[in-house]
Image (cartoon, rainbow, N blue to C red):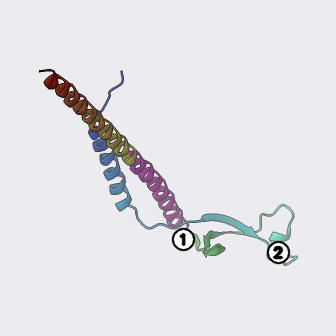
Amino acid sequence: MTIHLSNAEKIEVLEQQRAQILAQISGIGDLRSGSLVERYRRCGKPTCHCAAEDSRGHGPSFSLTHKVDGKTITRVVPAGLVARTQQQIAEYRHLRELVRRLIATSEKICQVQLEANKAASTQEAAKKRASKQNLKHKSKVKSRH
């Protein structure tokens, strides 16, 4: 069963969706873009445990990598801040998804407004044509008498 809404009802529903998205955006906490990478490294000392063939190396250490003005920036993240950094990256991704949904909803609102305006213009033009036809018909009737 399909429910058909008027343009005004569609706009109202879409505006409610937009308001919900904006409310979610206002609740976003600290955020940062980028990727968090877990790294292991070898120190280069031949007698160190990391020199063994089956060793992962020293670590893990964590690096946050992101772009700034087209350049890749890498920052070391202390182990104690890894969970917090992961949450900030998750908030950033959540914000991007909310913005994507906000844009899509806004575009739908604009499209329904265009359709409503087009329908109103078409109805107005039809009324004008009908009015002109009635005037012509009345003129002919009057001239016969």
Tell me the kind of residue under disc 1: Gly
Residue annotated with mark 2: 48
Q: Quadrant of the C terminus?
A: top left
Q: Quadrant of the N terminus?
A: top left
Q: Is residue 81 left or right of residue 110?
A: right
Front-lying residue, 69 or 8: 8
Q: Is residue 87 magenta?
A: yes
Q: Is residue 106 left or right of residue 35?
A: left
Q: Is residue 65 left or right of residue 106?
A: right
Tag 2's secondary structure?
A: loop
Quadrant of the image occupied by residue 99: bottom left
Q: Is residue 90 magenta?
A: yes
From the top left corner, tell me how far across and down residue 88 is, in percent: 49, 64
Determine which of the numbered discs, if any, sits on residue 80 in the image: 1
Q: Residue furthest left?
A: 145
- Region in magenta: 81-108
